[in-house]
Amino acid sequence: MSMRRSDREVKSIEAVHDILTRCDTLRLGMNGGKGYPYVIPMTFGSELKDGKIIIYLHAAGAGRKWDILTSDPRVCIEADLYYQVKKTEDGEITANYESVIGTGIAEQLTSQADKLAALKIILAHYKESGFPVSSCSGMSKVAIFRIILDEVSGKANI
C-alpha cells in the first residue's frame, strides 16, 4: 500500500533505522487473543543487518505479553519522535515528527550467547553499554525476543 503523503516518506532503510535509534520507546502491537489488539510500550534495541532492521525486546517468562507472543508471534511495532505543532504558510497547523512502523514475527532467543548479545544491544541503545550483563543474576529468568522486520516504513515532517 502506498503512503498517502509520499512527500513525507523516508525511503532509505538506513534513514528509517536512524529514526528508530533516536526513539526512547517502542510500542509493540500484538494480537491480544480477546478480540482486540494489545499494545504496550517497550524498551528495545535494534540493529541494521543485511538490509533488514532487527528489533530486540526483553520480557519476563510469564504474563500476558509472554502468553500472546508465544501463541501468536505476529507483531507490529511503532516508534516516533514528536517535535512541535506549528502553523503552516496557508494558516493550517501541522506536527513536526519522525516515525517508524513495521511488522514481523517475534522469535524467542534461547541460547545464552544470543540473549547476552541482544541485551547488550538493548543496553547500548540507552547508553548503558557498561552494565555487566553477563554477571546479572536475572539472566536465567529473562526472555529475549528478536523481530526481523519484514515490512517497515518511515515518515517525517521536519
Image: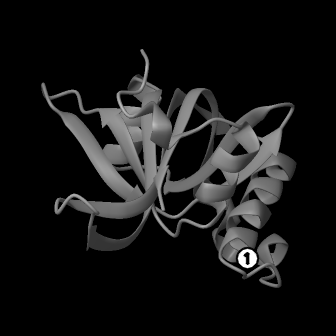
Which residue is at the front of the view, 110 or 118?
A: 118
> On screen, 84 above or below 52?
below
The image shows residue 66 at horizontal and vertical percentages of 42, 43
Would residue 91 appear left or right of 119 to someone viewing this image?
left
Whether residue 145 is situated above or below residue 133 in the rendered picture: above
Q: Quadrant of the N terminus?
A: top left
| Image label count | 1
Residue sitting at x 64%, y 46%? 16
Say few, some or many: other residues with alpha carbon within 10 Å of mark 1 (under 14 / 14 to 19 / 20 or more). few
Lateral position of residue 129 relative to residue 101, left or right: right
Secondary element at image label 1: loop
Residue at the (46%, 64%) spot, across then down: 25
| Residue 101 appears in the figure | no
Q: Quadrant of residue 68?
A: top left
Q: Position of residue 9 (x, y in %)?
A: 52, 38
Residue 73 showing in the rendered view: yes
Q: Which residue is painted at 38% across and 64% down in the image? A: 96
Would you place residue 13 above or below residue 97 in this image? above
Q: Is residue 78 above or below residue 69?
A: below
Residue 137 placement: quadrant: bottom right
Residue farthest top in this picture: 1
Amino acid bearing label 1: Cys
Q: Which residue corresponds to mark 1?
A: 136
Nearest the eye: 78 or 81: 81
Which of the 4 image quarters holds residue 86? bottom left
> Foreground residue, 158 or 99?
158
Residue 111 location in percent, x, y? Answer: 80, 42
Query: Which residue appears farthest toward the left when viewing the image?
Result: 35
At 78% from the left and 73% from the top, the residue drawn is: 133
